[in-house]
Image (tube, grey):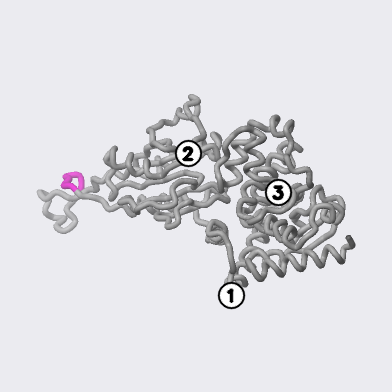
C-alpha cells in the first residue's frame, strides 16, 4: 500500500467522521499527518512545537487496517485520547520505563475504547483484560482508575500478554510534550476547542453524552478550589449575640448597651473518596492542604472517608494504614452522614474529593455550599451536578 493509498483511506475515514460524528473529524483535520516508520504502533500522537501531530507507521498501518470503518475507529481512538488529555496527563510516565509505558497505554486505551462502537483491529477491551487477570473492572471509568487497579498486576499482564496479536497505537510520542508543558497543553485544548466550535456550528452528530461532558469540562475555565473554599466560607451568614466586649454600633455613647459579635461556627466538612483511583499520596496531600488552610479559614475542619458509607477519620488515617482503597462509590452516604451528625446546612461548607464515579441521578441536597474537587481529566457522574466542580491540578498556589 503506497502513501497515496493510505492517505485516501485516512481521508475517507475522516470524511465519514465528519458526516457521522462531526467533532471527531474536525479534530483529525487539525492534526498534522506525518509518516514515520519508527513509530512503535500503527499511529500515535506526538508534540512537535507548535503543533500536535498524528504520526503514522505506513508498514504497520497497511498490516492492520484494510477498511474505512477500521481506520475510522482508530482515528476516533486518537481523538478520545486528546479529549481526556492523556498525552498531557501521562507525558512524564512515558519516560520512566517500558513497563510503566505499557501500563499507561493499556489503562488509557481501556478508558477510551469503550466509547468506540464496533471497536477496531488491535483495540484492547475490558473483556480481554478481565479474562487475563481474573479481576472484574468497572465500566466507563477514568484511565487513572484502571491504572491503579492494574498496576499491582503488572507482572501477570506482562506474562499473559494481550489476546490481540495485532499492533495497536503508539503512546511513546506523548513524552515529547513533557518538556513543553503548558505550551503543549494549551495547544491540545485549542485543537479541541476549535473542533468543538466548528462541530457545533455544523451539527455535532452522534456522540456519547459522557464524551460531550468531558469536552465541556476540558474547555471550562479553570478555577482554584482554594479560592472557592474561602469564598464559600466567607458567604456563611453569621448569627449575632450580645457582648460587652464590643460597643453598640447604633448607640456607641450608651455604654450600658451591649454590642453584637458573630456566634456562628463555620464547619468545613471534607469527604475523601476511598476508591482506587485516588492514590494515598494524593489523598494525604489534599488532607494536609485543607488542614493547613484551617488556620487561615476561621473554621472547624472535619474529615471523613467514603465509598458506600461515610466514616470519620483523622490525620493519621493514611499514616496508620487504615485506608482500604477499592470497591464501589456512592455520594448519597455523604449527605446521610451530614444529616446524622447534625451539620447545619446554613453554616456548613462541604468539600468532596472524589474520582467522580458515583450515582448518575441525585436529588439536590440542602447543603448549597458544596465544592466537588476532581483529579485532572475525570468527570462527575451526576447528569445534573449541583455545587461547584473544580479540578485538582497543581499543588502550588
At a point 42% along the width and 38% down the height, the residue shown is 308
Q: For the residue carrying disc 2, how many other residues have a C-alpha within 10 Å: few (<14), some (14-19), or many (20+)?
A: some
Q: Mark 3 points at which residue?
A: 123
Q: Mark 2 points at which residue?
A: 328
Check residue 245 for magenta coloring.
Answer: yes
Q: Is mark 2 on a helix, strand or loop?
A: loop
Task: Give the image location of residue 213, x and y in percent.
Answer: 53, 59
Asked whether the residues under the numbered discs 3 and 1 touch, taking CB atoms below 8 Å apart as contact, a structural biologist would say no
Mark 3 vs mark 1: in front: 3
Task: Give the image location of residue 359, x and y in percent.
Answer: 43, 48
Q: Mark 1 points at which residue?
A: 201
Q: In which quarter of the image is the N terminus?
A: bottom right
Work out how far the residue at label 2 is from the one at label 1, CA to CA, in angstroms: 39 Å
Boundaries of the magenta span:
241-246
Left or right of residue 33, residue 126 in this image: left
Mark 2 vs mark 1: in front: 2
Work out how far the residue at label 2 is from the one at label 3, CA to CA, in angstroms: 27 Å
Q: For the residue carrying disc 1, how many other residues have a C-alpha within 10 Å: few (<14), some (14-19), or many (20+)?
A: few
Amino acid at each position: 500500500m503506497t502513501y497515496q493509498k493510505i492517505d485516501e483511506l485516512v481521508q475517507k475515514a475522516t470524511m465519514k467522521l465528519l458526516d457521522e460524528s462531526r467533532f471527531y473529524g474536525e479534530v483529525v483535520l487539525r492534526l498534522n499527518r506525518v509518516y514515520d516508520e519508527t513509530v512503535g504502533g500503527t499511529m500515535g500522537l506526538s508534540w512537535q512545537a507548535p503543533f500536535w501531530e498524528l504520526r503514522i507507521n505506513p508498514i504497520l498501518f497497511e498490516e492492520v487496517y484494510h477498511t474505512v470503518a477500521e481506520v475510522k475507529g482508530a482515528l476516533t481512538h486518537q481523538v478520545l485520547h486528546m479529549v481526556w488529555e492523556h498525552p498531557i496527563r501521562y507525558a512524564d510516565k512515558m519516560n520512566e520505563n517500558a513497563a510503566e509505558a505499557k501500563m499507561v497505554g493499556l489503562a488509557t486505551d481501556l478508558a477510551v475504547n469503550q466509547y468506540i462502537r464496533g471497536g477496531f483491529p488491535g483495540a484492547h477491551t475490558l473483556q480481554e483484560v478481565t479474562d487475563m487477570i481474573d479481576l472484574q473492572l468497572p465500566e466507563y471509568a477514568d484511565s487513572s482508575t484502571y491504572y491503579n487497579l492494574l498496576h499491582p498486576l503488572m507482572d501477570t499482564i506482562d506474562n499473559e500478554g494481550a489476546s490481540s496479536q495485532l499492533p495497536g497505537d503508539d503512546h511513546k510520542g506523548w513524552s515529547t510534550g513533557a518538556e513543553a508543558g503548558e505550551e503543549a497543553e494549551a495547544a491540545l485544548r485549542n485543537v479541541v476547542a476549535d473542533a468543538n466550535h466548528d462541530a457545533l456550528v455544523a451539527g455535532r452528530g452522534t456522540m456519547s453524552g459522557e464524551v460531550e461532558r468531558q469536552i465541556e469540562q476540558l474547555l471550562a475555565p479553570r478555577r482554584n478550589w482554594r479560592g472557592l473554599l474561602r469564598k464559600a466560607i466567607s458567604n456563611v451568614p453569621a448569627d449575632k449575640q450580645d457582648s460587652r466586649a464590643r460597643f453598640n454600633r447604633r448607640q456607641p455613647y450608651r455604654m450600658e448597651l451591649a454590642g453584637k459579635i458573630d456566634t456562628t461556627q463555620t464547619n468545613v466538612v471534607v469527604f475523601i473518596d476511598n476508591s482506587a483511583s485516588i492514590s494515598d499520596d494524593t489523598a494525604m496531600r489534599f488532607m494536609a492542604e485543607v488542614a493547613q488552610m484551617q488556620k487561615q479559614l476561621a473554621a472547624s475542619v472535619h474529615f471523613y472517608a467514603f465509598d458506600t458509607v461515610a466514616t470519620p477519620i483523622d490525620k493519621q488515617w493514611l499514616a496508620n494504614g487504615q485506608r482500604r482503597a477499592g470497591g464501589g462509590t456512592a455520594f448519597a452516604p455523604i449527605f446521610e452522614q451530614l444529616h446524622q451528625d447534625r451539620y447545619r446546612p446554613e453554616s456548613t461548607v462541604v468539600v468532596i474529593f472524589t474520582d467522580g464515579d458515583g450515582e448518575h441521578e441525585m436529588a439536590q441536597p440542602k447543603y448549597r455550599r458544596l465544592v466537588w474537587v476532581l483529579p485532572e481529566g475525570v468527570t462527575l457522574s451526576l447528569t445534573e451536578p449541583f455545587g461547584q466542580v473544580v479540578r485538582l491540578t497543581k499543588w502550588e498556589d
